[in-house]
Image (spheres, rainbow, N blue to C red):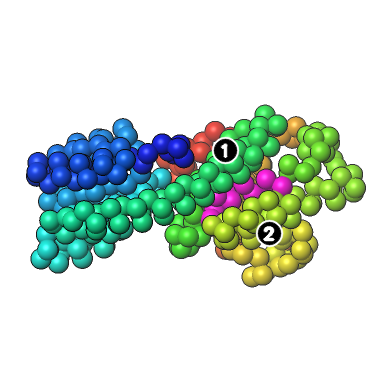
């Protein structure tokens, strides 16, 4: 992520030397840091090395076309928000259609005029600065969540496992891309409200008293309040608040039941319970996968867990038993 006071870095990729030099000169005059590439392979290598704030890609380049570079960038969750502008010929209608399909943010036609170039670049960089601010806010929340996890050596890696496996289960259940992204985020921050729980309760090796339980059961509400200012977390908030609810209404904090509980919260809950069962905690030893499945089946029969989510989860785990998710390999004893 770029420091706020540094000039934006723009990667230009074009195999026509005159066009490349012209674009480079115009952007340098505006104070931008410019990196140049003369073919697709070099452009990809420079993209990984430099991590630019914006890309200007000629559509037709040797080795790898600009549209293919754009597709790869936009298909990667870690880079998909970096603006990509494709440079095409005036009559290249098919290139523009393909560009739209692969996620290009904007287009410029050759010959590129100075005013149009600068206007497009400034507009896209303003948007990039906004998304960078959101990323910084998210990074603070993730750091806070991991600091809570770090208090207890028994839960090391718990957040990452939950994020990855919940997303995998969401894919199995054919959730939308936005819901799967919410599951990844919630996996990290679902217990962030525990920042308000005293260590004497959070790390207590024995059973909690009724008063201590009341304090602990406030953490989903506190977690929702902490994350609420981030509008990009609107699908994450219900997962944070409701991942301790039960299908029969006996959970907390709201006592909602059945389909009132968001399916994303039901998914995270199942993965959360399995991870807790299969890892050692101060109050118990780690259970094997078979023992954990048996315990969870009893909870399904009690009306606590969503049966369809659990069945899909167990099938996923059993089908991946030999080559399963690495994140579970360390916990599924």
Q: Earlier in the sequence, mark 2 or mark 1?
A: 2
Question: Picture coordinates of residue 220 (x, y %)?
Answer: 72, 53
Q: How many marks?
A: 2
Q: Position of residue 53 (x, y in %)?
A: 35, 44
Instruction: Indicate whether residue 187 is drawn in magenta.
Output: yes
The x and y percentages for residue 264 are 58, 60
Sort mark 1 into few (<14), some (14-19) or many (20+) by Cα contacts within 10 Å. some
Report the predominant secondary structure element of the magenta stretch: helix
Highlighted range, magenta: 182-193
Tag 1's secondary structure?
Answer: loop
Q: Which residue is mark 1?
A: 332
Determine if residue 264 is in view.
no
Q: Is residue 18 shown in magenta?
A: no
10 Å neighbourhood of mark 2: few (<14), some, or many (≥20)? many
180 and 11: which is toward the camera: 11
Locate residue 294, reporting x and y percent: 65, 49
- Horizontal arrangement in the rendering, residue 154 relative to residue 65 (left or right): right
Residue depicted at 81% across the width and 38% down the height: 198
* Badge 2 element: helix
- Looking at the rendering, which quadrant does residue 88 occupy? bottom left
Classify 153 as above or below 269.
above
Residue at the spot 12% in from the left edge and 46% down from the top edge: 19
Quadrant position of the N terminus in the picture: top left
Q: Is 18 left, or right, of 49 in this rendering?
A: left
Which residue is located at x 24 percent, y 56 percent? Answer: 115
Residue behind mark 2: 242
Q: Which mark is residue 229?
A: none
Measured Cα–Cα span from mark 2 to mark 1: 25 Å
Who is closer to the viewer here, 306 or 8?
8
The residue lying at 54 percent from left, 33 percent from top is 330
């Amino acid at each position: 992520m770029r420091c706020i006071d540094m000039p934006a870095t723009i990667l230009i990729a074009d195999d026509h030397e005159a066009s490349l030099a012209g674009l480079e000169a115009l952007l340098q005059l505006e104070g931008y840091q410019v990196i140049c590439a003369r073919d697709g392979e070099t452009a990809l290598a420079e993209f990984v090395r430099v991590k630019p704030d914006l890309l200007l890609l000629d559509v037709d380049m040797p080795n790898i076309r600009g549209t293919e570079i754009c597709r790869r960038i936009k298909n990667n969750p870690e880079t998909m928000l970096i603006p990509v502008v494709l440079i095409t010929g005036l009559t290249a209608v098919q290139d523009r259609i393909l560009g739209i399909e692969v996620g290009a943010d904007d287009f410029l036609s050759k010959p590129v005029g100075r005013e149009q170039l600068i206007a497009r670049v400034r507009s896209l960089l303003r948007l990039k600065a906004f998304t960078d601010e959101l990323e910084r806010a998210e990074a603070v929340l993730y750091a806070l969540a991991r600091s809570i996890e770090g208090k207890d050596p028994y839960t090391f890696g718990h957040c990452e496992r939950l994020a990855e496996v919940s997303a995998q289960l969401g894919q199995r259940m054919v959730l939308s891309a936005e819901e799967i992204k919410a599951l990844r985020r919630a996996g990290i921050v679902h217990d962030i409200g525990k920042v308000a729980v005293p260590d004497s309760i959070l790390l207590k090796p024995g059973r909690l008293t009724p008063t201590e339980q009341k304090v602990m059961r406030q953490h989903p509400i506190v977690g929702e309040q902490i994350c609420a200012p981030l509008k990009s977390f609107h699908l994450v908030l219900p997962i944070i608040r409701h991942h301790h609810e039960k299908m029969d209404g006996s959970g907390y904090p709201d006592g909602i039941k059945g389909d009132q509980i968001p399916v994303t919260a039901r998914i995270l809950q199942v993965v959360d319970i399995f991870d807790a069962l299969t890892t050692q905690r101060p109050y118990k030893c780690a259970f094997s996968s078979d023992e954990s499945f048996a315990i969870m089946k009893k909870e399904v029969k009690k009306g606590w867990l969503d049966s369809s989510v659990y069945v899909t989860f167990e099938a996923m785990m059993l089908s991946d038993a030999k080559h399963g998710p690495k994140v579970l390999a360390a916990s599924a004893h």
